[in-house]
Amino acid sequence: MNRSMVSCLFMMVFLFCVTGVQAKSEMVETLETPVLIDDFELIDQTGEPFTKNNLLGVWSLIFLGFTTCPDICPMTMSQLEGVRSELGMHFTPEKIPNIIFVAVDPARDKAVLKDYLAYFHPKNIGITGEISQIDRLVKSVEGFYRFDKKKADQSYNVVHTAAIAVVNPNGEMVAKINPPFGRSNTARELMLLIRGAGR
Amino acid sequence: MNRAVKSNYISSLVMTFLVAFVGSLRAEDTLVEKVDSVTPGKIFHVTSAYQPQRPGFMSMHVGYLTLTSVTNEDVYIVGVSSPDYQAVSIHRSFQMDGAYQMESVGELKISAGERVSLEPGGMHLMLYEPLKQRKEGDVTTIVFTLCDGQSLSFEMPVVSA
């Protein structure tokens, strides 16, 4: 093997490692042991009850947020819609995950949840309700949130989990999507996860 | 360089660029380029400025843009305002301990010849209390105040979310 071939191989390995690291940071983290979602009673944006039963028989992507969140929540919803759109090219509709936005600030979220969801894909689901019931679901997906101190104008920020829970049709969290995540990479890894679960 | 060495050299270069190209395809750019505009003045350019439309009940909106220095001196933005909003500031979203958080950025430095992006999930303009309903097709005027007291303004279109 001459010198130029060796340098070529070296460059290829180097570049593959660099790009590989970048891809790895966008990986869907699969849990070694699935976590069963606890019972909860919330309502969706149309006012209909939404419980653990609504998670059964379908894949779900559960994201914690709040409706007055100006930057992160709309961005994440858009990204998840992109992921779902890519999955739509590979799966029949029943295997495409629901996107579920858990509004953790019911004092501000409850009255406007329907208007908020209207700005995104019509299939998206928004749920909220009593704090105690929200907390049951949040605990199940190993998430958390915290209300920041109110400012003089009474506004406040809500610190919340960044990861998105992937829940299988048995109502078990089986993976987490850790941002920042790219649409194609996440869709590809979810596709493998969903196909693998179907075997 | 004889023909064999030259051939190997070229194939090496081609393979390297091929791998780099494939690698770049795997890394996705999450910033959506919306609209280009240029500020008046010779201090920095504003490009890709846009403001996603938000539901009417939201009193806080966001704006995104890219600032590119065209001077050989560092520039500091020490204030932001808008005739279309009660107040504007620069904020930064970030992840810490697995959670999304947000903080105010006191002043924004644009190093000489450098580029600073305000984009979803990172730094952004936080627009408080619109003076009237903002909808797709509207244009928001933003005024930056620099540390030497100069003011520079530009327009940012409201686009569909």
Image (cartoon, coloured by chain):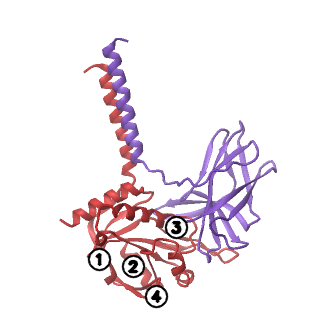
Q: Which chain is red?
A: A
Q: Residue at x 32, y 57 (%)?
A: A188
Find disc 3 in the rendering and name its residue: A74
Query: Tag 3, which chain?
Result: A
As measured in the structure, the alpha-carbon distance from the residue carrying label 1 to the one carrying label 2 is 11 Å
Callout 2: helix, strand or loop? helix
Q: How many marks?
A: 4
Residue position marked by numbered label 4 in the rendering: A47
**In this rendering, the label closer to the viewer, 4 or 1:** 4
The residue furthest top is B2
First of labels 1, 2 by sequence position: 2
Residue that mark 1 sits on: A171
Q: Residue at x 48, y 51 (%)?
A: B29
Measured Cα–Cα span from mark 4 to mark 3: 22 Å
CA gap between label 4 and label 1 equals 22 Å
Crowd tier of the residue under label 3, counting other residues whose Cα lies within 10 Å: few below 14, some 14–19, many 20 or above: many
> Split into 4 quadrants, where in the image is the C terminus of chain A?
bottom left
Outermost residue toward the right in this view: B149
Cα distance, mark 1 to mark 3?
Answer: 26 Å
> The disc labelled 3 sits on which kind of residue?
Pro
For label 2, the residue is A137
Residue A27 percent across, percent down from the top left: 36, 56
Relative to residue A160, is residue A15 drawn left or right?
A: left
Q: Position of residue A173 (x, y in %)?
A: 31, 71
Q: Position of residue A103 (x, y in %)?
A: 49, 77
Residues at discs 1 and 2 both on one chain: yes
Distance in Å between CA atoms under marks 3 and 2? 21 Å
